[in-house]
Amino acid sequence: MADFYCPYCNPNYFFKKQRPDGVLICGLCGDKLVKKKTFKPIRLLGLAACFAFIAPMILMLNSTFNQQKVDSPIEPIS
Ligand SMILES: [Zn+2]
């Protein structure tokens, strides 16, 4: 069963009630309960922001390692 919550009340204290017509309402304020979303768009935004900060660092490390390979040719041991 899908999880419902009241957007206005504290989730620790609210309780579900069912109206005679079958709609779930909050026991404290009497407002309709909202279905919890599993996918939140704000999470995608956060992920994009996180990637924007991390991607330049990864590219910089990658280019540094590639440069080291070119700069240090194998020298014979004398
Ligand atoms: Zn409520």
Image: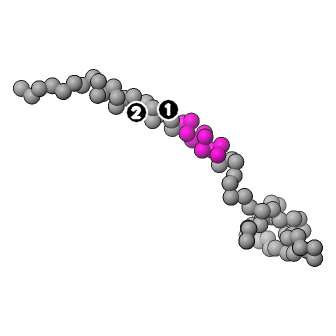
Three-letter code, disc 1:
Pro
Q: Residue furthest right?
A: 20
Which comes sooner in the sequence, label 1 or label 2? 1
Q: Quadrant of residue 53?
A: top right
Q: Is residue 51 visible?
A: yes
Residue at the disc numbered 2: 61
Q: Quadrant of residue 70?
A: top left
Quadrant including the C terminus: top left
Name the mark on residue 56: 1
- Of 12 and 76, nearer the camera is 76
> Crowdedness of circle 2 by 10 Å Cα count: few (<14), some, many (20+)?
few
Q: Pinpoint residue 8: horizontal percent, then vertical percent.
A: 82, 61
Q: Pinpoint residue 51: horizontal percent, then vertical percent.
A: 55, 39
Q: Pinpoint residue 2: horizontal percent, then vertical percent.
A: 74, 68
Residue range in magenta is 44-53
Instruction: Evaluate if marks 1 and 2 touch, with contact meaning CB atoms under 8 Å apart.
Output: no
Q: Secondary structure at mark 2?
A: helix
Q: Secondary structure at mark 1?
A: helix
User: Is 68 contained in the magenta span?
Assistant: no
Question: What's the CA distance linking mark 1 and mark 2?
Answer: 9 Å
Name the mark on residue 17: none
Q: Residue furthest top?
A: 71
- Of 73 and 43, nearer the camera is 73
Name the residue: 34% across, 29% down: 66
